Structure formats: C-alpha cells, structure tokens
Amino acid sequence: MAVVEQLIRSESDGSISFGNHTLDAKQKKEDFPHAGDLYKVKTFSTMTKLEKNGAFLYESVPGTSVNNMVETAKGVTFTVEGAEDAQIILGLKDDTEYEIKVNGNSAGKQSTGLGGKLSVSVELADMGEVSVEVTEV
C-alpha cells in the first residue's frame, strides 16, 4: 500500500509524495518546504488536494495517495493509488495541449483553458499503483 502516513514528504530523487486515501477524517499539512517551494495538502477518503505556493496543483475525488510526483517545464508525472476510480484535476499551463498516458498507454490529448486545469479519469479500483504522465505537445 502506498499511502503517505505523514501526509506529504520529499523523496530522495527530488520528487514529492502526498495524500492518504485511507483516512476517515480530513487532515491537512501546511507550509511544507520542498525544493524552494511551500506546499499545502488536504487529504482523506473522499478528496485529496495539493497547492504549491498558494496555487492549485492537484485535486482528486475521491481521495488518492500520490507518489513520486515530478513537475517539469513540459508537464508532470506521478503514480497514484486509490480505493475507487478517481477524477484527477491538475493545475498546468494556460491554453496548452497535453498528451496523457496512464500506465504507459495513451489516454488521448487534452487542452487546458484559461485557468490551466486538465481533468483525467483514472481507473484505480483493485489496480494498485497506476502511473500517470502528462506531457505538453
């Protein structure tokens, strides 16, 4: 199981892990320093949300556990686990087209609007960890 017991942590490879989809009550951690930025996470069984320097970065419904999230100039990669299929919303660049891959398979292309949000549906029930890669086209 890949839950993040401490809610958020920095990994030795420079990535970040956060969220605990097994919690019955909402928990949060604010002002977590990582690579010069400050993160805030709220998580429990029905929702997980991550902010970076006060800006929206990740939200899932229901809650998920995310491991080894890496942001680059061209997108984001991470593995995600949850008890049920999840709707994930990512905060990315405004008006940009992205290629989405789930477990290495193309899930199509999608463009962000003025708010830079991109929505991905991920099948998680009985799947264990699922890899997600979102790359600017």
Image (cartoon, rainbow, N blue to C red):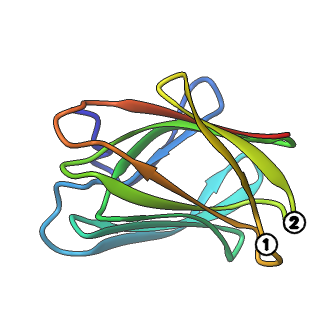
Lateral position of residue 89 relative to residue 14, left or right: left
Q: Amino acid at mark 2?
A: Asp
Quarter of the image where one finds residue 108: top right
Q: Secondary structure at mark 2?
A: loop
Residue lying at 30% horizontally and 61% vertically, measured from the top left = 63
Q: CA distance from mark 2 to mark 1?
A: 5 Å
Mark 2 and mark 1 in contact? Answer it, CB < 8 Å: yes
Q: Amino acid at mark 1?
A: Gly
Residue lying at 16% horizontally and 35% vertically, measured from the top left = 126
Q: Is residue 57 above or below residue 124?
A: below
The answer to whether one can see residue 70 in this image is no
Q: Secondary structure at mark 1?
A: loop
Instruction: Give the percent coordinates (x, y) of residue 42.
Output: 40, 70
Lateral position of residue 121 relative to residue 77, left or right: left
Answer few, some or many: residues within 10 Å of disc 1's Cα (few below 14, many 20 plus, some between 14 and 19). Answer: some
Residue lying at 85% horizontally and 40% vertically, measured from the top left = 137
Mark 1 = which residue?
113
Instruction: Give the percent coordinates (x, y) of residue 96.
Output: 86, 57
Lateral position of residue 25 relative to residue 136, left or right: left
Mark 2 = which residue?
95
Answer few, some or many: residues within 10 Å of disc 2's Cα (few below 14, many 20 plus, some between 14 and 19). Answer: few
How many labels were placed on the picture?
Answer: 2
Q: Is residue 18 above or below residue 124?
A: below
Instruction: Give the percent coordinates (x, y) of residue 45.
Output: 21, 64
Residue lying at 17% horizontally and 55% vertically, measured from the top left = 22
Closer to the camera in the image, 53 or 94: 94
